[in-house]
Amino acid sequence: MTGVSGINALDRFMDKVDVTTQNDCLLWTGKNVRGHGQFSFNGKYVYAHRFIWEWCEGKIPDGLVIDHTCRNPSCVNTSHLRVVSIKQNALENSVSPPALNNAKTHCLNGHLLDDSNTYTTRLGARGCRECRRRRSREWRALHPGYADKYWDKYHAKLRRET
């Protein structure tokens, strides 16, 4: 693929890559937005790591993203890149809030967050069953008789429906 000036896109790309770095990362030295390199291709800017992945490996499937296994967002070494889901990328990135929360083994009150003591909220967050039971007991103690009224209404509704 050649651009307007006749220069091959890959040659233009490689002119902006530092190949002299340690740990095998190939660092992008061109335009940069929040650590991720950007490359002008076909009249618009694309992420450098996505461009080189598609150039070397093929199209990135819909709904998937490129993960930097070296955790360096400026790296364009395809051996440091892999295709993953958005969720997997967020959970495996050790500094993202979802990854930090996923790594927690105990709630704020010290209860173990295992399968038997963990539930998922409507918003997708994890919650501690033991803490929820404690909060329910405290609420019922502050609102005596409310549950009885609720159940009376519920049973009356059931009787009407049958």
Image: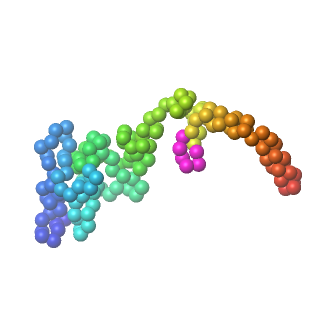
Residue 110 placement, left or right of 142: left
The stretch drawn in magenta includes residue 125: yes
Which region of the structure is painted magenta? Answer: 121-126
Please tell me which residue lies in front, 161 or 64: 161
Residue 127 placement, left or right of 29: right
Q: Position of residue 50 (x, y in %)?
A: 29, 55
Q: Position of residue 20 (x, y in %)?
A: 12, 43
Dividing the picture into quadrants, the one containing residue 43 is bottom left
Q: Position of residue 10 (x, y in %)?
A: 17, 58
Please tell me which residue lies in front, 34 or 1: 34
Dividing the picture into quadrants, the one containing residue 129 is top right
The stretch drawn in magenta includes residue 58: no
Which image quadrant: the C terminus? bottom right
- Give the colour scheme of this rendering: rainbow
Q: Is residue 34 visible?
A: yes
Q: Is residue 48 visible?
A: no
Please tell me which residue lies in front, 1 or 146: 146
Identity of the residue drawn at 42% across and 55% down: 63
Residue 72 placement, left or right of 22: right
Residue 104 placement, left or right of 135: left
